[in-house]
Image (spheres, rainbow, N blue to C red):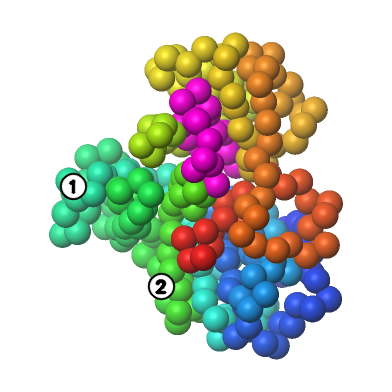
Amino acid sequence: MAEHIVPGIQYHDETLNKNAQEKYVLSIQFALDGFSFLFLDAERKKFTGLETYTLKNVESDIKFCKLLDTFFGDNPWLSGPFKDVLVIYESRKSTLIPEPLYDETEKSLFLKFNHAVSSYEQVISNFLPNVDAYQVFALPDCFKYRLDKYFRKKTILHHSVPLIESIIINNKNRHLHNTLFLNVRDKQIDIVACHKDGLKFFNSFYAPAPEDVIYYLLFVMEQLGYNPEEVELQLSGNIKKFSKHYELIYNYVRDVNFEIRTQVFKYSYVFDNVPAHFHYTLFNSHILQV
């Protein structure tokens, strides 16, 4: 395997059969700094395997795509005939458009209002039924070409789609007027706020250091009129209790909790040592297909 691809965690249930791909739904989450994939036994609605990989020194989409060729060349079984494939992409170029304003023929124009979209990128849209809006985002041509090459049957999702939809679905019976959701990625964070009518706020921020995380968190609270002493903060993603990120957050926000796994699915015992809030977006990629 290329030196730029560094294996992370690997959890496999003994029932996971790599030669029977048609039994599983494969979910893969991609970013320039790494990717991870998850296996769902479709018949039992049970997650049975998870693998993560870090990409080192990847500065461009072209290099990213070439590394994917190397990885899939070494792991040809991953492009087998899965029951379904869900591809989650962490695009930095995205914008939410309310359904009444959305026009499929103008989706590129919507995105270009907020981002510089190159001629080497395609514009994709996802509908969020519980938000009544479309997430429009950019996808590199070279990446789309690889997806078409390796997966004949697939659904491509912006990473915010399972994040936002799962938050709304999993908290539909709660009062969320004073609640914020913080999802921590490698060098990015996502902040979500909801109210009784659905989504109130969503945005992603570049936050490579703990100080950046608390800066944007307090900034959003100020914009929304939330008092840090009163707000309930729900954490998900790559953040551990007693980490510097957590300790800094707790200096300002005292009501801090970690997200739990959705109860719609079952989980193999191999995930017992994986914190329930880790890989939250990946585990909830199936939430709209239940």
**Percent x, y of residue 114:** 27, 38
Residue 14 falls left or right of residue 55 = right
Q: Position of residue 149 (x, y in %)?
A: 46, 79
Residue 147 in sight from this viewpoint:
yes
> Residue at image x 53%, y 62%?
286
Q: Which residues are magenta?
A: 170-193
Amino acid bearing label 2: Tyr
Q: Mark 1 or mark 2, which has the lower sequence index?
A: 1
The amino acid type, in three-letter code, at marker 1 is Pro
Rendered residue at 59%/24% (across/down): 232
- Image point 71% across, 26% down: which residue? 246
Query: Can residue 121 be seen in the rendering of this structure?
Result: no
Above or below, 279 relative to 245: below
Numbered disc 1: secondary structure: helix
Q: Is residue 173 magenta?
A: yes
Check disc 1 and report the residue beneath it: 100
125 up-or-down from 18: above or below: above
Q: Which mark is residue 145?
A: 2
From the viewer's perspective, is 271 left or right of 88? right
Please identify the quadrant where the N terminus is shown: bottom right
